[in-house]
């Protein structure tokens, strides 16, 4: 075991001693607390409509992961590709930039709107943009159904409301309630799901 792995294992053990959550939600919370160095994040996590089971099943089935910003994309464990899935973000695409300028909306919102077909059946991870999550909520209302959603945008304008909008729908969702969230939390949740998929694979081997 490398020094880094030893530090991570010890950190997870310290965090786990203070969290009173059942498995597998506990594994998600441990990684979020580890990424943020903040135990209060565990109290903000909402697990809506069996999202862990849905997310793990989707990952092992080869689903894609679609993110709101490239910073979130960059942090996600590429083990997802071993299952046949890919990680994508459309915020910097030329068609996204052009559409956002034409409509006067954020690029994150535009990316989800014009690539709505890619959201169907994918895990959608929002760690930065409340407008992207609001757009996703509208698309879900109109019939687009992701495999599950990680709802963790951060900020004082629309972040809290965007999470509640998604939680109104039956789509499986892990949300960080309130104004808090951000890339580290969103990435930690997603990587925890991928790690759980790997654990399930090892148990079946």
Image (spheres, helix red, strand yellow):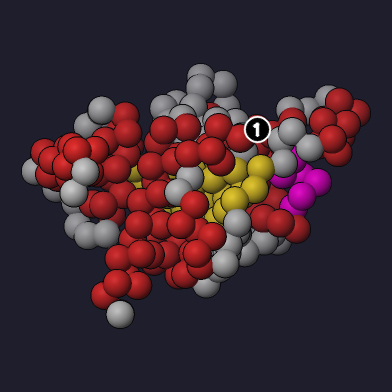
Whether 66 is drawn above or below 70: the answer is below
Q: Where is residue 32 in the image (x, y as percent from the top left)?
A: 32, 39
Please name whichever residue, 44 or 90, is drawn nearer the observer in this view of the structure: 90
Q: Is residue 81 left or right of residue 99?
A: left
Whether 56 is drawn above or below 10: the answer is below
Give the secondary structure at mark 1. helix
Instruction: For the C terminus, give its image quadrant.
Output: bottom left
- Asked whether residue 150 is in view, the answer is yes
Whether 38 is drawn above or below 15: the answer is above
Whether 111 is drawn above or below 149: the answer is above
Which residue occupies 30% across, 65% down? 199
Q: In this view, does 142 lie to the left or right of 41?
A: right
Which residue is identified by label 1? Answer: 131
How many numbered discs sit on the rendered protein?
A: 1
Q: Magenta span has 115? A: yes
Magenta highlight: main SS? helix
- What is the crowding at mark 1: few (fewer than 14 residues within 10 Å), some, or many (at least 20)? many
Please name whichever residue, 66 or 76, is drawn nearer the observer in this view of the structure: 76
Outermost residue on the bottom side: it is 205
Q: In this view, does 8 lie to the left or right of 154?
A: left
Q: Position of residue 67 (x, y in %)?
A: 60, 43
Outermost residue on the front side: it is 2
Which residue occupies 90% across, 28% down? 102
Q: Position of residue 45 (x, y in %)?
A: 34, 42
State which region is magenta.
111-116
Outermost residue on the right side: it is 102
């Amino acid at each position: 075991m490398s020094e880094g792995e030893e530090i991570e294992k010890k950190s997870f053990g310290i965090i786990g001693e203070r969290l009173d959550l059942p498995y597998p939600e506990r594994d998600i919370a441990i990684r979020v607390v580890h990424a943020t160095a903040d135990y209060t994040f565990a109290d903000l996590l909402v697990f809506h409509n069996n999202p862990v089971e849905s997310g793990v099943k989707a990952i092992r089935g080869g689903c894609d992961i679609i993110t709101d910003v490239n910073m979130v994309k960059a942090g996600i464990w590429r083990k997802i590709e071993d299952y046949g899935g890919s990680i994508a973000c459309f915020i910097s695409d030329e068609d996204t930039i052009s559409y956002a300028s034409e409509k006067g909306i954020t690029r994150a919102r535009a990316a989800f709107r014009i690539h709505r077909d890619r959201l169907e059946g994918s895990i959608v991870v929002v760690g930065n943009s409340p407008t992207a999550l609001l757009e996703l909520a509208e698309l879900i209302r109109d019939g687009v159904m992701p495999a599950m959603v990680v709802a963790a945008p951060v900020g004082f304008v629309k972040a809290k409301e965007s999470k509640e909008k998604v939680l109104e729908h039956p789509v499986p969702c892990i949300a960080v309630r309130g104004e808090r969230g951000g890339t580290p939390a969103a990435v930690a949740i997603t990587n925890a799901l991928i790690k759980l998929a790997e654990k399930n694979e090892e148990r079946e081997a």
